[in-house]
Each structure stands twice: as structure tokens, then as C-alpha cells.
Amino acid sequence: QVRLVESGGGLVQAGGSLSLSCAVSEGTFGWYAMGWFRQTPGTERVFVAGVSRSSYSTTYAESVKGRFTIARDNAKNTVYLQMNSLKPGDTAVYYCAAKIDYSGNYVYTSKLQYNYWGQGTQVTVSS
């Protein structure tokens, strides 16, 4: 079964940086568009960043543009989220997700479109 495992979460000070990784096993990573979502208590899981399966396109939520960068390494079956200039509002559980896709050109921003999810990793930004 397809398995996604996030790592890299933790506690950082406002203005600091953190890098998240998501390793994908089983399945065919090259056929997946990848995305990062986040969720706080009492809220729905929301889109943060996405990349198409061939890295042709990337998309970011307005709240993280200019601060976060998504990248993937298909040879390593891994997608990354580099987070800079972190703010307390970035505190959340971050989830990695995979969407089966055969176009190689699309980014998906709705959680309803994704097929597989990781367990999540906590990111806490102190003020």
C-alpha cells in the first residue's frame, strides 16, 4: 500500500526556518502530483503548497507565498517544504498528500482531490 511519511517538524522561533520532508514508498511516485496541507484545532485542513508530478508547475497559498518553497526529487521519491520567515500563524499539523495524475502538468489545491495522506507532523512557531 502507498505510504507517506513526513518528518522535520518541531518548535522554532518566529522568523526562523524549518524544512519538512515527505518520503513516499510503494506505488509510483512519478505519477503523483504532491501537496502540503495544514490543519489547526477546530479548522479544516487547508492547502499550503503543491507541485505537479514533473515539477512543471507549483502553487502556493497566499499566506505563504514568498516564504515557503515546495520541491520534489523523483529519484528519491521525496517531496520537501522549505519554510522560512516563520510566523506564529504557521503553527499547525502539516500533512503531505499524493494525487494520482497522468498529465504531469497540474497542481491540485483541494484536499478532496488527493488519494493518499501522511500521518502529519507538528510545526510550532513561538512568538
Image: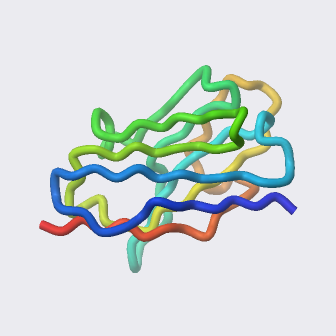
Residue 28 lies, in percent from the top left, at 84, 42
96 w.r.t. 105: above or below: below
- Which residue appears at 81% of the width and 58% of the height? 2
Residue 109 lies, in percent from the top left, at 56, 44
Q: Which of 40 and 75 is in front in this view?
A: 75
The quarter of the picture where the C terminus appears is bottom left
Residue 127 falls left or right of residue 34: left
1 w.r.t. 50: above or below: below
Q: Residue furthest bottom?
A: 42
Residue 52 falls left or right of residue 18: right
The quarter of the picture where the N terminus appears is bottom right
Residue 3 lies, in percent from the top left, at 76, 61
7 w.r.t. 76: above or below: below
Quarter of the image where one finds residue 96: bottom right
- Which residue appears at 64% of the width and 31% of the height? 52
Q: Residue furthest front?
A: 76
Query: Which colour assignment does the render follow?
Result: rainbow
Query: Quick check: can you spot residue 113?
Result: no
Count up the numbered dots: 0
- Which residue appears at 86% of the width and 49% of the height? 27
Query: Quick check: can you spot residue 48?
Result: yes
Residue 46 falls left or right of residue 53: left
Quarter of the image where one finds residue 119: bottom right
Q: Nearer the viewer, residue 113 or 58?
A: 58
- Which residue appears at 73% of the width and 25% of the height? 104
Residue 10 lies, in percent from the top left, at 36, 67
